[in-house]
């Protein structure tokens, strides 16, 4: 019994040392993975910045097309309103 009480702390310390080594190794591998991920994100950001001018041009063209559509729609709706008001005016003249 006395031998077991002397050996048990040694076994526990040995297992704790092994666990500490495993955790340190895992931490180092995790740090390396994070660094690789950060490098990949930086590279992706650089590539995305190269497309920024393209996105700006597409946005500009889309805005102009939208503006043209709005102007055309306003023009058409004004013509329809004018024609409908002329028809109403003729109908009122005929009724009187």
Image (tube, rainbow, N blue to C red):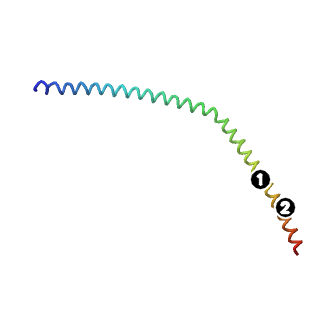
Q: Earlier in the sequence, mark 1 or mark 2?
A: 1
Q: Secondary structure at mark 2?
A: helix
Residue 94 relative to residue 38: left or right: right
Query: What residue is shown at x 51% (from left), y 28% (from top)?
Result: 39
Q: Nearer the viewer, residue 71 or 2?
A: 2
Residue 24, given in percent of the width and then of the height, sits at 34, 27
Expressed as whole percent of the image width and height from the top left, the position of residue 1 reads: 10, 26
Helix, strand or loop at label 1? It is helix
Q: Position of residue 69 (x, y in %)?
A: 75, 49
In the depicted view, which residue is nearer to us: 75 or 93? 93
For residue 33, which quarter of the picture? top left
Tally of marks? 2
Task: Tell me where residue 17 sits by quadrant.
Answer: top left
- Residue 46 in picture, x, y percent from top left: 58, 31
Q: Which residue is mark 1?
A: 73
Q: Residue at x 25, y 26 (%)?
A: 15
Q: Mark 1 and mark 2: span between their CA atoms?
A: 15 Å
Q: Are marks 1 and 2 in contact (CB under 8 Å)?
A: no
User: Left or right: 92 with respect to 17?
Assistant: right
Disc 2 target residue: 83
- Give left or right: position of 3 versus 25: left
The quadrant of the picture occupied by the C terminus is bottom right
Q: Which residue corresponds to the image point at 55% horizontal and 29% vertical from the top-left?
A: 43
Res. 35 mark:
none
Q: Crowding near pointer 1: few (<14 within 10 Å), some, many (20+)? A: few
Q: Residues within 10 Å of mark 2 (few under 14, many from 20)?
A: few
Direction left: furthest residue: 2
Identify which residue is drawn at 14% across, 25% down: 4
Quarter residue 77 falls in: bottom right
């Amino acid at each position: 019994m006395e031998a077991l009480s002397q050996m048990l702390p040694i076994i526990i310390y040995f297992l704790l040392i092994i666990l500490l080594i495993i955790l340190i190794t895992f931490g180092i591998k995790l740090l390396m993975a994070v660094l690789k991920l950060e490098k990949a994100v930086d590279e992706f950001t650089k590539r995305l910045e190269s497309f920024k001018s393209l996105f700006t041009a597409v946005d500009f063209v889309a805005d102009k097309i939208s503006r043209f559509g709005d102007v055309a729609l306003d023009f058409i709706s004004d013509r329809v309103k004018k024609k409908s008001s002329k028809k109403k005016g003729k109908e009122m003249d005929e009724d009187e």
